[in-house]
Amino acid sequence: MVVLAVSSAVVASFGWACGSMMAHTPVRTVGVFEFTRIQLLTSGGILCALCTALGYWQSVVWTQWPAFALSVIVSVIIGNLAMMECLRRAGPRKTELLLSLKTPIVAALAFLFLGETLSLGELGGIGIALFGICLAILFGSSGQDEASVSRRDLLLIVVLGVIAAASQGVGFLVLKPVLSAGTEPLAASAVRIMGAAFVVSLAGLMPLKAVRPIAEMNWLLLLRVIVPGFIGYGISVSLLLYAYAHYDAAVATVLGSLSPVFVLPLLWLRTGNMPHPLAWAGALLSLSGAAVILL
């Protein structure tokens, strides 16, 4: 069970790395709100169909609805809107760096509210992995893949990144008791995504410029929005929830935060620029930290 939980978190990281790379251009084209709305509606619909086909709805502990509601509002809506805006303004590298902050946030909250404690070995492994992740992000590219950032925008980007990291961490953590009560991770993911899709769709009815698409949609652009959405919301989220259900929250979070490591070869393939040796050193440190955690 531990091996499956660890593998799920690592594969979730790979999924988010792919989704981040695929989402950078379309989110700048269609706008953050419309991008998020389309992804939530399509991913939620696919997840609901899968849960119906697999008979997972009966596993949902509906008495835990406050946890679902909190996860929807904090994680899926606030967290993802902040993340997408950060991604649009700063690019995938800076966004991933700021999102890595959710690991210490989750560790602290899991200790305070769930009573989870970590061994010295696990703490050391988390520290090594986080240091490696930061190295992989900071030296992961020459910066040609990033959006240009002015000094004035830097503070806003940091604020957006911290909000996204804290919101995502809290949104996953509040579902751990729900998962422990027997709710299937895929069903939990479907409930939170459909709840978020409903709220975002209602918000889209408001006569505000911020919720209007900034580009005309076509089938190719729609596909480029849907695919990274399902990879992130449908596959990676469900896998990480499985890891949360069967392993410590802090460990699952750090293993689910390895996407900057997987981004390195993807950036290399896309740009043709070899990442800095320190970036590869960071990748090795991250994997070493993961190994220390599992020993």
Image: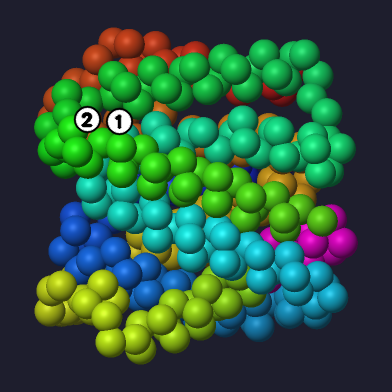
Type of amino acid at the residue the image marks with label 1: Pro
Residue 278: x percent and y percent?
A: 32, 11
In the foreground, 71 or 275: 71
Among the 4 quarters of the image, the one containing residue 212: bottom left
Q: Main secondary structure of the magenta part?
A: helix
Taking the spot 55% from the left edge, 51% from the top edge, the residue there is 167
Image marks 2 and 1: residues in contact by CB distance under 8 Å: yes
Residue shown at the point (18%, 33%) measured from the top left: 151
In the picture, the disc for residue 265 is 1
Relative image position of residue 178 (x, y in whole percent): 79, 62
Element type at marker 2? helix
Percent x, y of residue 162: 46, 41
**Structural crowding at the residue carrying mark 1, measured as other residues with C-alpha within 10 Å and reported as few (<14), some (14–19) or many (≥20):** some
Q: Measured along the vertical axis of the image, is residue 257 above or below residue 35?
A: above
In whole angstroms, how far apart are the C-alphas of marks 2 and 1? 5 Å
Secondary element type, mark 1:
helix
Quickly name the residue at label 2: 268
- First to last magenta residue range: 178-188
Q: Amino acid at mark 2?
A: Trp
Q: Quadrant of residue 189?
A: bottom right
Q: Nearer the viewer, residue 212 or 194?
A: 212
Residue 184 in picture, x, y percent from top left: 74, 65
Q: Residue at x 39, y 11 (%)?
A: 281
Q: Give the quarter of the image for residue 180.
A: bottom right
